[in-house]
Image (cartoon, grey):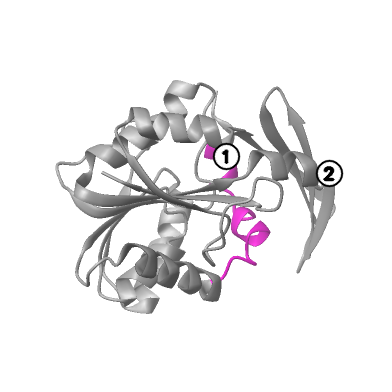
Amino acid sequence: MAEWFESWFESEEYLKVYKHRDEREALQLVESIISITNIKNKSKILDLACGAGRHSIEFAKKGFLLTAVDLSENLLNNAKVNAQNAEVDIDFIRADIRDFYIDDKFDLVLNLFTSFGYFESDEENFKVFKSAYDHLNENGFFIFDYFNKKYLEENLIPNSSLRIEDGEIIQKRRIEKGRVIKDIIIKKNGNEKYFKESVKIYSLDEIKSKLELTKFNIKDIYGSFDRSKFDESLSNRIIIIAQK
């Protein structure tokens, strides 16, 4: 049986749901990461779960050497077209991050936009930390971007809808058995399609503990990429800057 992300990320509607995540936002995030890490031009970067490649492309535009990994053929195809249009060269690899390994080392590894917690077991989910560590050069940085458990639980929006050119996307959210579940209904031309997202909710303490067990040194924790300090009640994100 296919896992939820295999069908949802391969659908044409996925990118419509997240179309508000644009190049301007990606550029701001990239510039913030460069400022935080002081990473040097021509450094090698690994983007784990790159999606349609927004962040990889912005890094590549600035002269960094990118390898970008994702399981979704649909998103990778979009990423390749976007990279070609931006006239940048990125090494795109289709792989499952649970068992991804290449014989190469990087100065920076990224896991952005809550590309984490998709799998059923903790062991599977936290494999991404080991993969990041194993692919880093000594003193290389790992940037981990995830939602804030307390903020999510207190501010979850149960229902929302989005008009698209040929119909409507309805999203219904709930927290169930330690996961945030989103049911997605796509209504188009009198027809309906159903998709689902299911992401495990981890606390900051759980994440920090696993990073430290992986031998990462946690350098800083922000509540957003504007470098505001993390506040458990007010921050909607957890941005962890870890170093090997």
Residue at screen point 54% across, 28% down: 2
Q: Which dot, 2 or 1, sits closer to the camera?
A: 2
Quarter of the image holding residue 44? bottom left
Instruction: Tell me the quadrant of the picture where the C terminus can be found.
Output: top left
Residue 118, can we see it? Answer: no
**For the residue marked with disc 2, what is the amino acid?**
Pro
Kindly state the secondary structure of the residue where label 2 is placed: loop
Pick the residue in front: 227 or 119: 227
Q: x, y percentage for residue 236? A: 66, 52
Residue at screen point 65% across, 61% down: 16
Q: x, y percentage for residue 122? A: 49, 23
Marks 2 and 1, Cα distance to the nearest angstrom? 23 Å
**For the residue marked with disc 1, what is the amino acid?**
Ser
Q: Which residue is mark 1?
A: 7
Pick the residue in front: 130 or 68: 130
9 part of magenta stretch: yes
Compared to residue 14, the image places residue 132 above or below, namely above
Local packing at callout 2 (Cα closer than 10 Å; few below 14, some 14-19, many 20+) is: few
Residue 61, can we see it? Answer: yes
Kindly state the secondary structure of the residue where label 1 is placed: helix
Compared to residue 205, the image places residue 62 above or below, namely below
Q: Which residues are magenta?
A: 5-22
Local packing at callout 1 (Cα closer than 10 Å; few below 14, some 14-19, many 20+) is: few
Q: x, y percentage for residue 82? A: 42, 70
118 part of magenta stretch: no
Q: Which residue is mark 2?
A: 158
